[in-house]
Every structure is written in structure tokens, then in C-alpha cells.
């Protein structure tokens, strides 16, 4: 069961890592393993992500309100259907379909084999190299308002779905896709955050039914971790968007590779178990 100390630590970890391309779910899994704690599980991870997603809702509240209101009105007003906000509403819906479908189909694997630390370490390394390649080759010129399309939204969507495996990173996968499509770093990150909203809210709401039942974490520590993740996450998203406007992702790539190799070494040496 999750204790109060674990809740504080894991809430901090979630808030610090959710928006960075380093995989928050991998860090929650790895920190728990090295601390000697039981794997908190997919349900706990999904629920505390509601905290960081609330930070996104508040940070982008103006853009989100414009998207929702314009998209809704465009259903009845043809003149609004070409507006960027109305189109963005459809792009978010289409981009959410891959993770929604695969999340339901692979629910058992997400809660078991995908949380194997050998797989986590491997994905940290592999997707770090892909991010490095994308960052080095991207032309960094396309913007969401002018260039986002349904094909691009689908590519983003499948990239987000890869984050069902801890170690890939939701933001890392979608930002990488955006860079490969030649979007500016800031635009790729912004769409990544917007695209995550329906998936995270739906996943967290679904897993809420598991909290407090059987071997699942209790409500108290889960709520505490969620609140902490919101506070820290709000600061993290603001910092990250400022940082990538003037910096490449090299530091994150190096960190992912080092962490990935260390996790694999730790499992191989028997310092931590592959399964929680």
C-alpha cells in the first residue's frame, strides 16, 4: 500500500517529469523500485496524472476555452469551421483515438509486462536516440495554426499511444513526432500538452474506480500525491516551454540514456527486481 511519504515523493516525481521528455511513469516505476517500495501500479500513476493535467488546463485555459467554444459553435455555424480553434478541436479528437483504442485493447499488458524495468530501461534509451535524431534534423518551422492537418494529428496520436509503455514518455513521443514533421519545438510541445488532455482525464477517471479497492492505493495518499503533482507540474510546464524556445533536447537525451543503462544494469546485477 502507498504510504504518506511515498505519496509525497511520487507526487513530486510526477509533477517534475510529466511534461519533460523523460517519462513520468518510468520515473515513478524506477524511484519506487530503488526505494524498495512496491510498484504503485498503473491505477495510481493514471490518477495522480490528473494533478499535472489540471495544471495544463489552468496554464492553457484561454486556448482551451477558445478551442472548445469555437469547435462547439462550428457544429452549427459553417463560417467557423475554417477557424484554427475549430480545426484544433477535431485534431485533438482524432489524435486521441489511437491511445484510446490501444489503451483499452492492451489494458492487461499496461498493468503487467509493460512495467518490466528491463523494458523501461530499453525504451528510455531507444526513444532518447530517436528524439536526438529528430531534434538534429528538424527544420523547426511549421506552426499549429497554419500547418496542422488530420494526417499530422494521426501521426501525433500514434506517437502518444507509444507512451502506454513506461519509458517512452507522452511528451517525448509526441514532441519527437512533431519535430520529425518539422514543427517548431514550442508548437510540437504545445500540441503534445493539448492532445494529452482527453487521454489523461479519461484514463484517470477510469482508474479512479480502482483506488481504495483491494490492493490498490488508499484515497488519502493518492489525493495528496495528486495535489503535489499539480503544484509542481504547473511550474514545470511553464519552465519547459520557456526552455525549449531557446534550447535543444540534448540534455534530456543524455539523461535518458544514462538512466536507461543504469536501470538495466541495476536489474541485471540484482539490485532491483524487474517486476514490482
Image (cartoon, grey):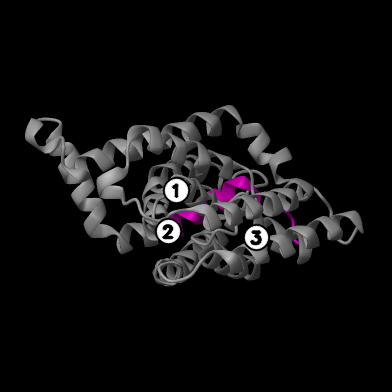
Q: Badge 1 is on which residue?
A: 178
Q: Are marks 2 and 3 in contact (CB under 8 Å)?
A: no
User: Which residue is nearer to you in this view: 237 or 261?
Assistant: 261
Q: Nearer the viewer, mark 2 or mark 3?
A: 2
Q: Are marks 2 and 1 in contact (CB under 8 Å)?
A: yes
Q: Are marks 3 and 1 in contact (CB under 8 Å)?
A: no
User: Which residue is nearer to you in this view: 31 or 264?
Assistant: 264
Few, some or many residues within 10 Å of mark 1 (<14, 14–19, 20+): many
In the rendered view, would you say 255 is above or below 96? below
User: Which residue is nearer to you in this view: 81 or 148?
Assistant: 148
Task: Specify the label residue 27 is tagged with.
Answer: 3
Q: Which range of residues does the magenta coloring cover?
A: 37-52
Q: Badge 2 is on which residue?
A: 185
Q: Compute the Cα span from label 3 to label 1.
A: 23 Å
* Main secondary structure type of the part rendered in magenta: helix
In the rendered view, would you say 8 is above or below 33? below
Badge 1 element: helix
Residue lying farthest to the right in this orientation: 269
Amino acid at each position: 500500500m502507498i504510504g504518506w511519504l511515498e505519496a509525497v515523493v511520487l507526487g513530486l516525481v510526477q509533477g517534475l517529469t510529466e511534461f519533460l521528455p523523460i517519462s513520468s511513469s518510468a520515473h515513478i516505476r524506477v524511484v519506487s523500485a530503488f526505494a524498495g517500495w512496491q510498484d504503485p501500479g498503473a491505477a495510481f500513476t493514471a490518477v495522480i496524472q490528473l494533478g499535472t493535467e489540471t495544471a495544463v488546463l489552468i496554464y492553457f485555459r484561454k486556448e482551451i476555452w477558445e478551442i472548445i467554444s469555437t469547435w462547439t459553435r462550428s457544429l452549427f455555424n459553417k463560417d467557423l469551421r475554417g477557424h484554427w480553434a475549430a480545426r484544433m478541436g477535431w485534431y485533438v479528437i482524432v489524435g486521441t483515438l489511437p491511445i484510446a483504442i490501444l489503451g483499452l485493447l492492451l489494458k492487461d499488458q499496461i498493468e503487467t509486462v509493460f512495467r518490466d524495468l528491463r523494458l523501461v530501461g530499453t525504451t528510455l534509451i531507444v526513444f532518447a536516440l530517436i528524439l536526438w535524431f529528430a531534434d538534429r534534423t528538424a527544420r523547426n518551422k511549421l506552426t499549429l495554426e497554419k500547418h496542422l492537418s488530420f494526417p499530422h494529428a494521426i501521426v501525433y496520436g500514434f506517437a502518444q499511444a507509444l507512451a502506454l509503455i513506461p519509458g517512452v514518455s507522452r511528451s517525448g513521443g509526441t514532441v519527437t513526432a512533431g519535430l520529425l514533421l518539422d514543427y517548431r519545438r514550442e508548437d510540437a510541445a504545445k500540441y503534445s500538452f493539448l492532445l494529452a488532455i482527453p487521454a489523461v482525464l479519461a484514463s484517470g477517471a477510469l482508474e479512479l474506480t480502482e483506488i481504495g479497492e483491494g490492493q490498490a492505493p488508499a484515497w488519502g495518499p493518492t489525493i495528496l500525491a495528486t495535489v503535489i503533482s499539480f503544484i509542481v507540474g504547473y511550474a514545470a510546464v511553464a519552465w519547459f516551454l520557456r526552455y525549449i524556445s531557446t534550447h535543444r533536447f540534448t540534455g534530456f537525451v543524455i539523461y535518458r540514456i544514462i538512466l536507461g543503462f543504469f536501470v538495466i544494469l541495476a536489474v541485471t546485477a540484482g539490485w532491483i527486481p524487474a517486476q514490482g
